[in-house]
Amino acid sequence: MREPRFYETPDCATVGGDFWFPENEAGSFSTSDIRTAKSICRSCVHQSECAEWGIAKENYGIWGGLTQLDRKILRRQMRTNNQEEKSA
């Protein structure tokens, strides 16, 4: 699994901004920043690879169009599926 910093011309690299890490100091999230980040991710050729990285390695920020909560839900589903496969 390649680290995102090694991707060739990812869309996020051409755009600055704090919307990749939309949590503010009060602990709430900017929905407009999340929408902006997800929109950029949807058009990126590295979206799937970046999402995989985020699921496996990242706790904060938006990776491959997935928020912290999105990744948490996916991780939980993956663990459940793995446990079901082992018990079958």
Image (cartoon, rainbow, N blue to C red):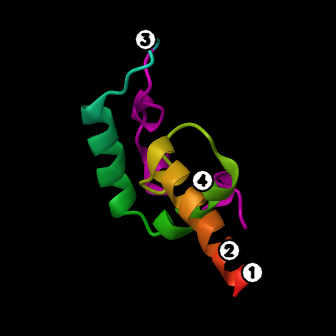
**Of labels 2 and 4, the one closer to you:** 2
Residue at 70 percent across and 57 percent down: it is 3
Residue 60 shown left or right of residue 15 in the figure: right
Disc 1 to disc 4, how far (Cα)? 25 Å
The answer to which of marks 2 and 3 sits earlier in the sequence is 3
Distance from the alpha carbon under mark 2 to that under mark 4: 19 Å
* CA distance separating discs 1 and 3: 41 Å
Q: Which residue position holds label 4?
A: 54
Mark toward the start of the polypeptide (2 vs 4) = 4
Is the residue under label 3 in contact with that under label 1 (CB below 8 Å)?
no
Disc 3 target residue? 26
Residue 53, how many percent across, how many down? Answer: 64, 58
Give the quarter of the image for residue 4: bottom right
Determine whether the residue tagged by mark 3 lies in a helix, strand or loop: loop
Question: Which comes sooner in the sequence, label 3 or label 4?
Answer: 3
Q: Which residue is mark 1?
A: 86
Mark 2 highlights which residue?
Answer: 82
The earlier-in-sequence mark between 1 and 4 is: 4
